[in-house]
Image: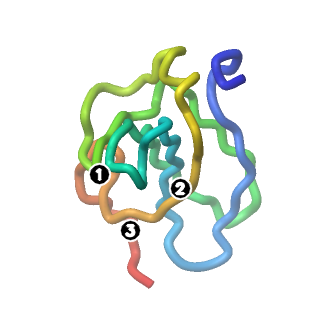
């Protein structure tokens, strides 16, 4: 199903707190088993409800929180996605410190 698209679209708004977020797609065998790749992209949640689009080409692979390659997920990688989620992080998807991150 994901293979037929070019990215992910979602509607979001920041009602309060940190507006720096990541969307994360996790391959089967990922997050809780300690294996598999997580694909993530940074986004800023606007104060007004908006539709955001994240192209698959902008997703960065990571493993155990560390970047592990160049952006862009393959069609085979898309077939392996088992879950997705949103998260706050003090790191950007390329592993550098996020200047937009706020605690609390």
Q: Mark 3 points at which residue?
A: 101
Q: Nearer the viewer, residue 15 or 85?
A: 85
As displayed, is residue 82 above or below residue 70? below
Task: Please provide percent x and percent y for residue 82.
Answer: 58, 39
As displayed, is residue 37 above or below residue 15? above
Element class at badge 2: strand
Instruction: Tell me the distance, in whole angstroms, between the alpha carbons under discs 1 and 3.
Output: 16 Å
Rendering quarter of residue 83: top right
Query: Which numbered disc, 3 or 2, marks the residue that appears first in the sequence?
Result: 2
Task: Please provide percent x and percent y for residue 85.
Answer: 57, 53
Residue at image point 55% right, 24% down:
78
Q: Mark 2 points at which residue?
A: 44
For label 2, the crowd category at 10 Å Cα-Cα, with few meaning under 14, some 14 to 19 and many 20 or more, is some
For label 3, the crowd category at 10 Å Cα-Cα, with few meaning under 14, some 14 to 19 and many 20 or more, is some
Query: Which numbered disc, 1 or 3, marks the residue that appears first in the sequence?
Result: 1
Which label sits on residue 65?
1
Confirm or deny contact between disc 3 and disc 2 (CB under 8 A).
no
Element class at badge 3: loop
């Amino acid at each position: 199903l994901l293979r037929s698209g070019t990215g992910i679209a979602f509607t979001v708004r920041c009602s309060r707190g940190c507006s720096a977020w990541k969307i994360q797609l996790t391959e089967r065998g990922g997050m809780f088993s300690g294996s598999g790749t997580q694909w993530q992209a940074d986004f800023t949640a606007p104060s007004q409800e908006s539709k955001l689009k994240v192209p698959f080409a902008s997703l960065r692979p990571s493993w155990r929180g560390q970047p592990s390659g160049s952006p862009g997920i393959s069609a085979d990688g898309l077939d392996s996605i088992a879950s997705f989620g949103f998260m706050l992080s003090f790191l950007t998807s390329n592993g550098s410190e996020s200047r937009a991150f706020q605690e609390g």
